[in-house]
Amino acid sequence: MGPAASGSRGWWAMNVAFNTQDIFTGKHDGVALFTYEERSEAEMRFGAKLGRNAGLARERKEFSGKRGELFVETQAASPRFCMLVGLGKRADVSAGAVREGAGAAALRLRDLGAKHIAIEAPMELDAQAVGQAVAEGAMLSTYQFTRYKTVKVDEIKAVESITVVSERSGLGVRNGVEIGRTIAESCNLVRDLQNTPSCDLTPEGFAREAMQVCRAEKLPCKVLDRKQLEKQGYGGILAVGKGSPNEPRLITIEYFPKGAKRTIALVGKGITFDTGGISIKPADRMGEMKFDMSGAAAVLGAVRNAARLRLPVRVVGVMALAENMPDGRSYKPGDIVRTKSGKTIEVDNTDAEGRVVLADALHHAAAYAPDIMVDLATLTGACVVALGDVAAGLLGNDEKAIDAVRAASLASGERVWQLPLWDEYEKDIKSSVADVKNVGIPRLAGTIAGAMFLKQFAGSVPWAHLDIAGVAWASGREIYFTPSGSGTAFGVRLMTELLRAQAQ
C-alpha cells in the first residue's frame, strides 16, 4: 500500500518550519501576508516592497480585504509570487478565518507553481492558535493523492516546504505551528487511507497500516482476526464480513500516559467497501463506498495525535473493520445476529451494516469504563439529506458528552449539529423476534433510528455519536480543504480538540 508509516516522517508528511526572519528575505518562491478590510501593517510593508499595485486594486475595487479574497503580485523578481490574503473586518477575525486564508493562499501559490511557500502569521490573535491555524490550513489544502498516477507525473505541481513566519519570537507561534503540523500530518495520513481503493485497503490491510502507525508511536495495538472474533463472540462484525474473502478485524489501540486521570474511548466504523450486501446498492457512485471506513481512519489519526502531542489523557481507539459483500455465505435479511453483548439483532436490511459492526465495537470499548465514548461513522444517507456536506450529525445519551463534542467542533472548525434522541424513537427499532432490528421505519428519521440502535449497545457510558456520512469525503464540490473525490479526514481535528480539552 505504499511506504510504511514509520519514523518521524511518512509519505503523507511535509516539511513545515517556523522562523522570525523578514518574509521577503527568505529563499521562498511564494509568500503570503494577511490583511483586513482595513489595511494592515503587513499590507503597508507589502506595498513598500512591491509597489502600488495592491493599492490600485483596492481603488478599482478588485481587492477589498474581505474574508477569502486574494491579491497576487507577479511582477516582483523575488519572491516570484507575492500574495495578500483578506481576513475580513479586523474586529471579527478568528482562527478559523486564518486557517481558511492560509489554506486558500497555499493552494493558489501551489497552482501558480510555487514550491517553497512562506506565510506570515497575523499578530492580532493568540500566538499559539494562529501558528496552529496557519500550519493546518496550508498543509491540508496542498495535500494531493498521487500514488496511482503514472502519466505526466513530473508535471504535477507540489509544495515542498512551508514556512510560517512571525515577528513574535516567543514559544507561542512556534508551539502552535508544531501542533498544527502534527494534526495536519495525521489528517493527511487518514486521507491517504481513505483514498486508497478497497482492492488494496482490505480489513487486513488497514490493520497492517494501523500497526505501522502504532510501532512508530510506540503504542500497543491488538488485532483480533476472524478466528479470535469467533472464539470471543463478536457476532456483529462476523455477520457483516461473512460474504467477503477479506476477513474482518477488530483493532484496539491504547495510549495510556502516566498520571492520566480521564479515559476517552473513540470508536470507528471501518467498512473498507460497502456494496450493501444482499440488499445491494445501486451502481451509481458505489465507488465512493471505499470511504465507508472513514470513521475508523479518523480514530487512528486522533489517537496518533494524542501520542504525538503527549496529551495527559488515556485514549482507547477501537476500529471495527469488515467488507460488506454479496455472496452465498453473506448474512441475509431476516437473519438474527447475536452480538458480543448478548443482545440479538434482527437484520432487516444488510445495507445497514455499520451499526451492526458498531454494536460489537461499542460494547468492547465500554468495557474500558471511559469517562466519554464517541463513535464516528458514515452511518446514514438520511444525515446527508438533513445536513448536506456542511456538518456531521451529533446525537448521544449524555448532554455533557454532547456539549464537549460541540465545544471541540467550535475549536476545530469541523461543524456538528445536534439531533434529538428522544425515547419515542426507540419503538421504531423494536423487533418482534429479536431484541432490536437494524433499521427503523422507512423514510422516517433514519439518522435518529441509527443512533437509537447504537444507544442500545453503549450501555451506561456517557456516549456521543457522530454521523459523518455527509462530510467524510468531498463529492461534487470542495469541502474542508478537500477537492471533490477525495477523503476529508473529518473528525481527526475535531477529536483531537476534544482530547486536548479533556486533558486540561
Image: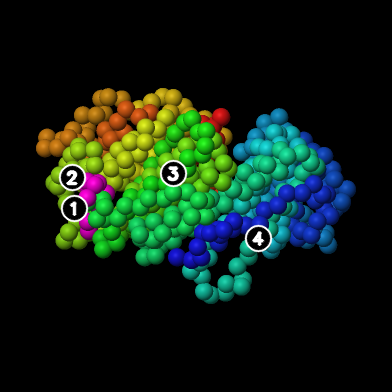
Mark 2: amino acid: Val
Examine the structure image and report whether residue 23 is included in the region drawn in magenta. Answer: no
Distance of label 3 from label 2 (alpha carbons): 28 Å
Residue beneath disc 1: 331
Q: Nearer the viewer, mark 1 or mark 3?
A: 3
Main SS, magenta region, reads: helix
Examine the structure image and report whether residue 235 is included in the region drawn in magenta. Answer: yes
Distance of label 4 from label 3 (alpha carbons): 34 Å
Quick one: SS at disc 1? loop
Residue beneath disc 3: 254
Mark 4: amino acid: Val
Q: Determine whether, in the image, residue 304 is placed left or right of residue 435.
A: right
Label 4 close to label 1 by CB (< 8 Å) = no
Residue beneath disc 4: 159
Mark 3: amino acid: Glu
Q: Residues within 10 Å of mark 1 (few under 14, many from 20)?
A: many
Q: Quadrant of residue 365?
A: top left
Q: Earlier in the sequence, mark 4 or mark 1?
A: 4
Residue name at image x 33 percent, y 50 percent: 250
Residue beneath disc 2: 337
Label 2 close to label 1 by CB (< 8 Å) = yes
Quick one: SS at disc 4? loop
Q: Nearer the viewer, mark 2 or mark 4?
A: 2
Q: Earlier in the sequence, mark 4 or mark 3?
A: 4
